[in-house]
Amino acid sequence: MWRQSGAAPSKGAAFFWGAVAMAAAVLLVAPGVPVLAGSGAPLSHGEAVKAARRIQNACFATYPPELLLRLTGSETVPSEVRDDPALQMKAFTHTDQREKGLFYPTSLDDTLDAFESEVRPGLRLLDLGSGDGRVVFLSAVLGADATGIEWEPTLHRLALDARKRLGSFVPRGRAHLRQGDFLREDFSRYDLLFYFGSGSFDDTALFDKIRRELRPGARLLFAHETLPPSGLHEAAAYSVVKVYVQPAGPGSP
């Protein structure tokens, strides 16, 4: 997760989704039930846990020594840390301050319950400050059409590297990584937004934009909330993630 400034932030076989398969998944799978990428079958919680672990390890494997030093205080970490996302999160004792903000990875273990409940096939998700790409990859595996926008070029390159390492495990057609300013993106194109608290030094500008552009019924997944975003209604809470919904406008049914 790239913590961005307000001005300019910051499973084995190949997967194939034909139009018929996608339509069938959307029609047959109940809301809130994730789908195993490429299979049309529901993804069990155990499979989701394994997917999150694989994604986090692939992302962590891309971190160069200088980034490890800034995040952990050491240029190297034991092999058991590289193989265990929980130990990775414990090792991150510092945030990485850059020109536009701070970088600190999102724990997919802490946010998995929210993704399993809120992400489903056919939804379009935008990760606001996508860092090493882990939220985009998990959302795509769960069936969403997921886009991540990251301001910091070096972090964007890590995400591209992680996607290459994950290969066909992450459906290429549903995982989109872009380098740029998410405040220039049209939020009305998306059903779900994901945001890590304190990800912008000026949350006011971001939440003003969300209120203006988020469609009625679209939802904001807000991890590690700092202050509740005014104008949005709290719809659910999962561990470290709260979900806010854009209310219907006047005269809406």
Image (cartoon, rainbow, N blue to C red):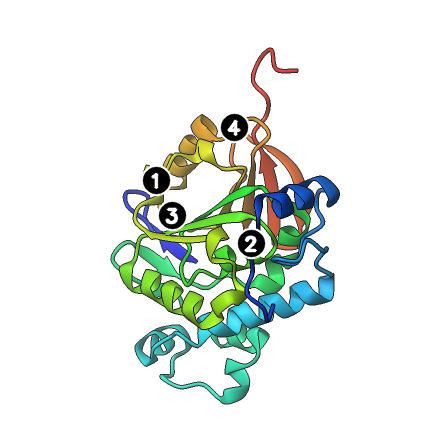
The first of marks 1 and 3 along the sequence is 1
Query: Which residue occupies the foreground of this view, 195 or 157?
Result: 157
Residue pointed to by mark 2 = 139
Q: Is residue 146 above or below residue 134?
A: above
Most distant residue in the top direction: 251
* Residue 120 appears in the figure: no
Report the amino acid beneath label 4.
Answer: Arg
Q: Earlier in the sequence, mark 2 or mark 4?
A: 2
Q: Which residue is mark 1?
A: 183
Identify the disc placed on residue 200: 3
Find numbered disc 2 in the image and state the secondary structure of the residue it sits on: helix
Q: Earlier in the sequence, mark 3 or mark 2?
A: 2
Residue at 57% x, 13% y is 250
Q: In the rendered structure, which amino acid carries the disc numbered 2? A: Ser
Q: Residue at x 41, y 41 (%)?
A: 203
Residue 22 rendering spot, x and y as whole percentages: 62, 45
- Indicate whether 20 appears above or below 56: above
Secondary structure category for the residue under label 1: helix
Q: Quadrant of the N terminus?
A: bottom left
Give the Cα distance between marks 2 and 4: 20 Å
For the residue carrying disc 4, how many other residues have a C-alpha within 10 Å: few (<14), some (14-19), or many (20+)?
A: many
Question: Picture quarter containing residue 112?
Answer: bottom right
* Secondary structure of the residue carrying numbered label 4: loop
Q: Amino acid at mark 1?
A: Leu
Q: Residue at x 40, y 32 (%)?
A: 209
Disc 3 residue type (three-letter): Ser
Q: Nearer the viewer, mark 1 or mark 3?
A: 1
